[in-house]
Image (tube, rainbow, N blue to C red):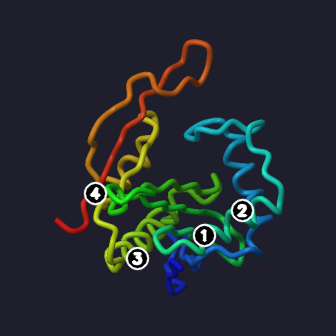
Amino acid sequence: MARIKAQSFASKLNLELVVRNANAKDSEALLAMMDSVLEEQVFSLTEPKEMNLSLEQEMAWIESMNNHPSHLLLVAEIESKLIGMLDFTSGHRKRIAHTGEFGMSVAIKYRDQGVGYALLEALLLWANSHSTIEKISLKVHANNPRAIHLYEKFGFKEEGRLKNDLKYGERDYVDTVVMAKSLKS
């Protein structure tokens, strides 16, 4: 089981920010937060109408993430309100088991307050102590400079671009930036 010790951070507004493992009790709040993020219709692969997980499916996903030794599902809370999440999955074949990829979402009201920073710091602390994980990757929309800047602060480097990979509208294309960080070089 991939577990971290719950960690407290101070948000930029000086509120206590807690990062911890997700649990089944978070299912409803996670779905609601993701719905609000998807409603923005920017910086995510999924469109709002495509997200139709039931509470039971969300609970099963959380359980499967928590039961895998090289997967990690974190949530961030301020004043007991779930305001961010990060999911990390490792490679499922032997030759890529040393790698993994994460995705992260933060509720719009709580962006630029250190939530993404805290989630990413918790991931890297866990990954650096993990016996298998050697490289962490991510994909980010090229039109999301705040996220790219955050990843660069943590030492992630651009490894490539997928040109016109995302289609926001009839003729509005965005590149996907592939970034990675080696942990055990």
- For image coordinates 50% across by 57% down, the residue present is 112
- Label 1: how many Cα within 10 Å (few below 14, some 14–19, many 20+): many
Q: Nearer the viewer, residue 59 or 172?
A: 59
Tell me the distance, in whole angstroms, between the alpha carbons under discs 1 and 3. 14 Å
Label 3's element? helix
- For image coordinates 72% across by 62% down, the residue present is 30
Which quadrant of the rendered structure holds the C terminus?
A: bottom left
Residue 83: name its quadrant: bottom right
Q: Which residue is mark 3?
A: 126
Callout 1 touching callout 2 (CB < 8 Å): yes
- For image coordinates 33% across by 71% down, the residue present is 132
- Label 2: how many Cα within 10 Å (few below 14, some 14–19, many 20+): many
Which of the marked residues, 4 or 2, is nearer the chain's N terminus? 2
Q: Nearer the viewer, mark 1 or mark 4?
A: 4
- Label 3: how many Cα within 10 Å (few below 14, some 14–19, many 20+): some
Tell me the distance, in whole angstroms, between the alpha carbons under discs 4 and 3. 14 Å
Q: Residue 70 in the image: x percent, y percent?
A: 46, 70
Q: Amino acid at mark 2?
A: Leu
Q: Nearer the viewer, mark 2 or mark 3?
A: 3
Q: Amino acid at mark 1?
A: Val
Q: Amino acid at mark 3?
A: Trp
Q: Nearer the viewer, residue 114 or 18?
A: 18
- Horizontal side of 74 relative to 101 (left or right) equals right
Q: Which residue is mark 1?
A: 75
Label 4's element? strand
Q: Which residue is mark 4?
A: 181
Tell me the distance, in whole angstroms, between the alpha carbons under discs 2 and 3. 22 Å
Q: Which residue is mark 2?
A: 30
- Horizontal side of 34 relative to 126 (left or right) equals right
Against 180, residue 129 (above or below) is below
